[in-house]
Image (tube, helix red, strand yellow):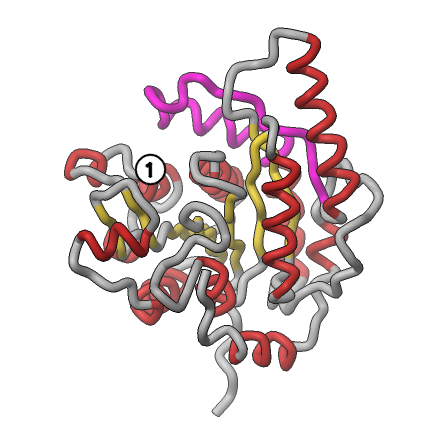
Amino acid sequence: MPATPTPKGLFITGTDTNVGKTVVTAALGLALRRTGVDVGVMKPVETGYTPDSRKSTSDGCRLRRSVAPEDPIELISPYCFPSPTAPLHAARLAGQTIECHVILDAYHALAGRHEFMLVEGVGGILVPLTETHDVRALLMRLNLPCLIVSRTSSGSINHARLTLMALRERRIPIAGIVLNHTSAAATTPEERQQIESTVQLIRELSGVPVPDPLPFHSELAGQWDTEIKRVAKDSTIQELCRTLIDEIAHCSLHFRGIKDGGGHGHAVRSGFTDILKGLDRDSSDREHGQRGEGTNPA
């Protein structure tokens, strides 16, 4: 029986919670849609929702409203839990168990409707979903490359490098790092120096593309529908959008991994093209990695 082709898409993870994964996912989806690409979105697991947020302000709902309003929310977000805790704990409190096959079925149903998929993770890459599987294990099953979203604040260098290590350990292809200003602009020389040094060192030490950081948008919480359209026009989002469009048009986007050249590389200031075009690991390696990921305690 022939292998099922890998759907085209990108997985968006974060170095932490509340770093801007939903913002980046929605903005990139909007930017791609504006160019004519048929994009689907997914937030497989979400915690901390209320009945009201489920209808309007939950991450899944915002993604659906901004990018793919025709898709059922049940496919976009198959698991939603009230407790604002880690998915494993939130599921336990709700008397449920997160089943990877449910997420995969929803993903393939959406991928069958769209030309390209954007899948937003929950928390960081090693956040536990079950007793034996974490977000990284799910990403391996989806067989997608990963885009990392991180802050520019103090501590982000360590968080970014740990995330890179976790992905490279499983040879998961890394498309780049999007840095996000999650608070108002720095006002003192010391604050500006901290941010500038963080961006510089992440570029220097990551070995993956790191474009200019996204600016802080203070009105996003209260005026999502308006502000996310502005974020979609940011040069960082537009750059990634152009690269993905080129890849969609000229190759199959069967991302099979990148050869890890170690954690250190020269500063890469812009452009995801070289990384995306270098995802050339044998699919047999990918399949072997998936088989080895069956038990993956976080």
**Residue 159 sits in which quadrant?**
top right
**Residue placed under numbered mark 1 in the picture:** 62
Instruction: Judge by depth and name the residue closer to the eye, 152 or 27.
Output: 152
Q: Identify the residue at image location x=60%, y=33%.
A: 155
Q: Identify the residue at image location x=27%, y=33%.
A: 57
Q: Let me know if residue 98 appears in the view.
A: yes
Q: In the image, 93: left or right of 272?
A: left
Q: Position of residue 47 (x, y in %)?
A: 29, 45
Amino acid type, residue under disc 1 in the picture = Arg
Q: Dot 1, crowdedness within 10 Å: few (<14), some or many (≥20)? A: many
Secondary structure beneath disc 1? helix
The majority secondary structure of the magenta stretch comes to: loop
Report how many numbered discs are placed on residues in the image. Answer: 1
In the image, residue 147 lies in the stretch drawn in magenta: no
Instruction: Judge by depth and name the residue closer to the eye, 289 or 231.
Output: 289
In the image, residue 212 lies in the stretch drawn in magenta: yes
Instruction: Judge by depth and name the residue closer to the eye, 80 or 190.
Output: 190
Q: Position of residue 134 (x, y in %)?
A: 43, 61
Q: Which residues are magenta?
A: 209-237
Residue 284 in the image: above or below residue 43 = below
Q: Identify the residue at image location x=34%, y=48%.
A: 86
| The residue positioned farthest toward the top in the image shown | 188
Q: Position of residue 263 (x, y in %)?
A: 75, 52
Q: Identify the residue at image location x=36%, y=46%.
A: 68
Q: Let me know if residue 245 appears in the view.
A: no
| The residue positioned farthest toward the bottom in the image shown | 1
